[in-house]
C-alpha cells in the first residue's frame, strides 16, 4: 500500500504506470510502501536476499528545463535520500538510509 507523509498526496496513473506525490512541504515527506500485507500472504524467508527496484523522477515546475540543485552541486543536503525501516514487534526497529547523489547507482 502506497502512502505519503503528513499532508502529502499520492495519486496513481494506471495508464502511464506512475505514482505522483504532491503537496510535499517537509524534507522527510515522500512515497512510502508498506508491504506488510504482501509479506503476510507470501512470507519473507529469513536469510534470503530480495531485490527491490525503483525509479524516481523529480518533476517540479521550477525545475523544468533546469538541473536540480542536487545535479548542480552534488551536495548531499540537496539530494534524495532513500530510507528503509523494518518495524519489529519488540519496538527495536531497524533503519537503513542511502543518499542518492549524482553518480551513485545501486
Image: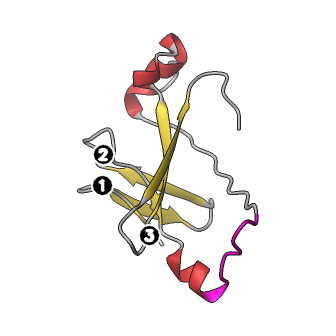
Disc with the residue nearer the chain's start (1 vs 3): 1
Q: Residue placed at 52% from the left, 18% from the top? A: 67
Image vertical order of residue 29 relative to residue 34, above or below: above
Tell me the number on the disc at residue 8. Answer: 1
Label 1 with label 2: CB-CB less than 8 Å: yes
Q: Quadrant of the C terminus?
A: top right
Q: Residue placed at 44% from the left, 59% from the top? A: 32
Label 2 with label 3: CB-CB less than 8 Å: no
Image vertical order of residue 56 relative to residue 84, above or below: above
Q: Residues within 10 Å of mark 1 (few under 14, many from 20)?
A: some
In the displayed structure, does residue 49 sit left or right of residue 20? Answer: right
Q: Which residue is mark 3?
A: 88
Residue 43 lies in the magenta-colored region: yes
Task: Where is residue 28? Give x, y as percent.
Answer: 33, 44
Q: Residues within 10 Å of mark 2 (few under 14, many from 20)?
A: some
Residue 88 visible somewhere in the drawing: yes
Q: Which residues are magenta?
A: 41-48
Image vertical order of residue 32 relative to residue 40, above or below: above
Task: Where is residue 92? Give x, y as percent.
Answer: 39, 62
Q: Which residue is mark 2?
A: 24
**Marks 2/3: CA distance?**
28 Å
**Marks 1/3: CA distance?**
26 Å
Between marks 1 and 3 in the image, the one whose residue lies nearer the viewer: 3
Viewer-proximal residue among 72 and 20: 72
Task: Where is residue 63? Give x, y as percent.
Answer: 44, 26
Q: Residue placed at 48% from the left, 37% from the top? A: 81
Amino acid at each position: 500500500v502506497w502512502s505519503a507523509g503528513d499532508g502529502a498526496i499520492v495519486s496513481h496513473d494506471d495508464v502511464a504506470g506512475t505514482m505522483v506525490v504532491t503537496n510535499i512541504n517537509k524534507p522527510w515527506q515522500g512515497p512510502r510502501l508498506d508491504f506488510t500485507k504482501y509479506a503476510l500472504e507470501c512470507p519473507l524467508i529469513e536469510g534470503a536476499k530480495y531485490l527491490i527496484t525503483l525509479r524516481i523522477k523529480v518533476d517540479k515546475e521550477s525545475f523544468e528545463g533546469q538541473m536540480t540543485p542536487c545535479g548542480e552541486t552534488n551536495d548531499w543536503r540537496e539530494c534524495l535520500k532513500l530510507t528503509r525501516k523494518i518495524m519489529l514487534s519488540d519496538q527495536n526497529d531497524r533503519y537503513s538510509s542511502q543518499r542518492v547523489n549524482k553518480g551513485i547507482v545501486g
